[in-house]
Amino acid sequence: MKKTVLITGASRGIGKICSIIFAQKGYNIAINYNTSDSDANKLKDDIILNGGTAEIYQADVSSYQQVADLVKRVYHDFGRIDVLINNAGISMHKVFTDVTCKEWEKICGVNLSGAIYCCREVIPHMLRHGKGRIINISSIWGERGASCETHYSVTKAAIIGLTKALSKEYASAGINVNCIAPGCIDTDMLSEFDEDELNKLIERTPCGRLGTGFDIAKVALFLASHESDFVTGQIIGVNGGFE
């Protein structure tokens, strides 16, 4: 039976590339999105056109009820969820004291609560199957912190804590929980940076370039595979040696 991966925030960026890579390896792809309906549909069509299996699921992961409904629909359609990739996230480039309470609630809801809700709903299914993989997408800023991205850094640091705690709680049940902490990746999240700022990021990266979604997706694929059976509770930096 084909394995199924549920990827949140899958219509663009890292989530989109993960969807493509996992589809090429024979997974059923459950594409979660919130507002990017046309992008999600195009991704689904592209996967199917290339011989893969995919379905789209609209849900705002900051809503517990929508996450519960999302997981129920995926399980109904595919009968299993073998891998969960908590990728949905939003960023905010603002001075700490300028961030409003409403903005904090939004970024915390998507980046942190969304991951917690998805884990909460998927783990019971994995327990019934006796195995599973959870891959959380954090950030280098969750490890180091970033000026003018305090709120984002806080949520990504919390994802690291979530990963370490869950890995200890569920390892004996056959569920491996790991985290990828990307460095500077060429996605929409860098759209606020001008050319000079991007060049400065590249200068701080010994590999001499920005990362790509493929750099992240290939690590996610390893963490989802049997080759990573003895890997859990790890925070894997994919950052080109960023200093």
Image: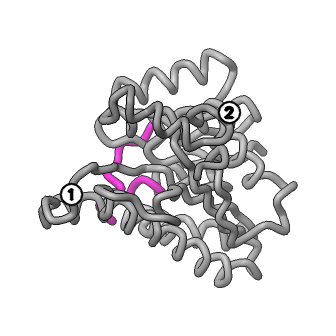
User: Any mark on residue 40, and which?
Assistant: none
Q: Can residue 65 be spotted in the picture?
A: no
> Is 205 one of the magenta-colored residues?
no
Percent position (x, y) of residue 150?
32, 63
SS of the residue under disc 2: helix
SS of the residue under disc 1: loop
Is disc 2 surrounded by few (<14), some (14 to 19) or many (20+) residues within 10 Å? some
With respect to residue 103, does 204 lie above or below?
A: above
> Which of 136/242 is in front?
242
Question: Which residue is disc 2 drawn over?
Answer: 21
Magenta residue span: 55-72
Question: Which residue is disc 1 drawn over?
Answer: 95
With respect to residue 148, does 157 lie above or below?
A: below
Residue 113 in which image quadrant: bottom left
Name the residue type under label 2: Ile
Percent position (x, y) of residue 198?
43, 33
Say which quadrant the N terminus sits in: top right
Q: Is residue 161 left or right of residue 233?
A: left
Residue 110 in which image quadrant: bottom left
Residue at x 52%, y 66% (from the top left corner) = 143
Q: Is residue 131 left or right of residue 210?
A: right
Residue at x 33%, y 29% (from the top left corner) = 194
Residue at x 45%, y 21% (from the top left corner) = 42
